[in-house]
Image (cartoon, rainbow, N blue to C red):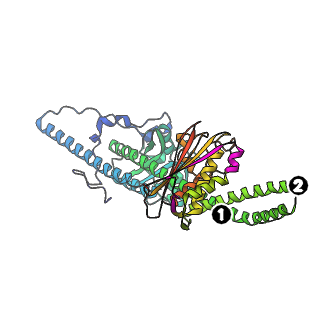
Amino acid sequence: MLKYLGNPQGESNSNEQPEPSSWSEESNDLATETPNDDHSQSEESLPNWEPAMEPDNELDRATMLGQKIEGLERRIGYLERIVKVSQILNSTLSLEPLLQIIIQAATELTNTEACSIMLIDKRTGELRFAEATGGASEALKKVSVPLDNSIGGWVVRKDRPLLIRDARNDPRWHRGVDDTTDFETHSILGVPLKVRDEVIGVLEVVNKKSENGFNQDDIQIATTLSAQAAIAIENARLLDELQQAYRDLSQLDQIKGDFVSIASHELRTPLAVILGYASFLRDNVTGQASEQLEIVLSSAMRLRSLIDDMVNLRHIQTNEVQLDRSMFSLRQLVLDVTQEFSQLVTGKQQILTTKFNPNDSPLNIDADRQKIYLILANLISNSIKFTAEGGRIHLNVELKGYKYWINVIDTGIGIPKSEYDRIFDQFYQVEPSLTRKYQGMGLGLSIAKGMVEVHKGRIWVDSVVGKGSNFTVVLPSAPDVEVL
């Protein structure tokens, strides 16, 4: 007896057969279909219960009333047990123990010798045993049951319960199952496992222990249980698929991280050699060769910048960023960074301006100077890239309380509101990768965000498509300042 299935009030001994009148007329819609073939005699359709005759005397009426009360109590008991099973099913998310609970509950509630669950294999379209009484052995799991000419297949295709009292004389009976399990099948009741109008498998209870065999009660119980079980099975399968997707994603992320680490390491050595020889040759040649070497050096420096970006990103991902704090002037750092980009700004005929508040203060900050530089450089570079020729870029730095508010404002192409969060993802760019006209790997904003968060700061963007963007960074002026 299942420990979690209490003995309902008024329930008879497990060897006693419930009276067939207990479900009477409510269950007529669950009647199995009688096919027009040779095996129709072995297939049982549910009876259409006739209304009871009016009793002739008071004693008969009392007896009939007692029977009805007993039937109702038995029905309530079954429903209470099914509710308990349902609660357990809804709290179990692992598929294997879930199937075992369903098997045990089905055999208990229908008073049968065995039960099995077959689920549709999405690859082959056949039924395969997912669980059975005593556990589904590896041999049984290899048994495939076709949808054509099988009892389980009939239930799936017709989407209706099927009761067969003499399975061995029914040509649809799959003999290979008994041969595999060393079990002798006599009678079968099969009901569909259905989720959102889609049949996903079959629940079969086998060999009713009572001499009277299966009745309408059993079909009602099995159908009700299968409805709950199908939802629980589908939820467990979806959870398994989701967990597998997370595992695959984690593995992919690990592969990507390893690639970035290895690639950046392997590229540094040959790049250092190229930079060294190019610098040496540039200093010793003149004329057109010197100009060509300048192009080589510029390209090599750009490649080194990309490698540095990948290394910084890898450190952010693995939480290996170490802060080398010092006290320095944020105002001077901003002026140094803007000076470095002045040639690029001039080349695009853009206007780059700065403003500080208070204007007469060095705006000292206790932070990692190199990492604050990366924040500013990536934001300015991003604005220059996505602002057309003749556009404007403005840097505003303001001390509010014990926090610095830095705004990088441009008149660029703007960013759709739906992309506000995604632009800070690594390797992400708003424009399609195959048609984009702006260079870059999509790492700048991701690195800037990582460096801001390492300093316990915040970064966000406000933008209007076609008008421009405003990137806001809030940084604490010292390690013990909290940024909300």
Q: Going 76% across and 63% down the picture, which residue do you hit? A: 271
Q: Residue furthest left?
A: 58
Q: Residues within 10 Å of mark 2 (few under 14, many from 20)?
A: few
Query: Three-letter amino acid code at disc 1?
Result: Ser
- Label 2 with label 1: CB-CB less than 8 Å: no
Q: Amino acid at mark 2?
A: Gly
For mark 2, give the secondary structure: loop
Front-most of residues 143 and 459? 459
Of residues 431 and 64, the one nearer the viewer is: 431
Residue 91 marker: none
Q: Position of residue 434 (x, y in %)?
A: 69, 43
Residue 247 seen by the camera: no
Residue 218, position as x, y percentages in the image = 35, 45
Pinpoint residue 413: horizontal percent, then vertical percent.
Answer: 61, 39
Relative placement, left or right, of 105 versus 448 is left
Q: Which mark is residue 261?
A: 1
Q: Does the magenta run of residues contain 352?
A: yes
Q: Nearer the viewer, mark 2 or mark 1?
A: 2
Left or right: residue 278 versus residue 37 is right
Which range is magenta?
A: 342-365
Quarter of the view holding residue 298: bottom right
Let me know if residue 326 appears in the view: yes
Quickly name the residue at label 2: 287
- Residue 126 location, x and y as percent? 56, 46
Q: Quadrant of the N terminus?
A: bottom left
Disc 1 crowd rating (10 Å Cα; few below 14, some 14-19, many 20+) is some
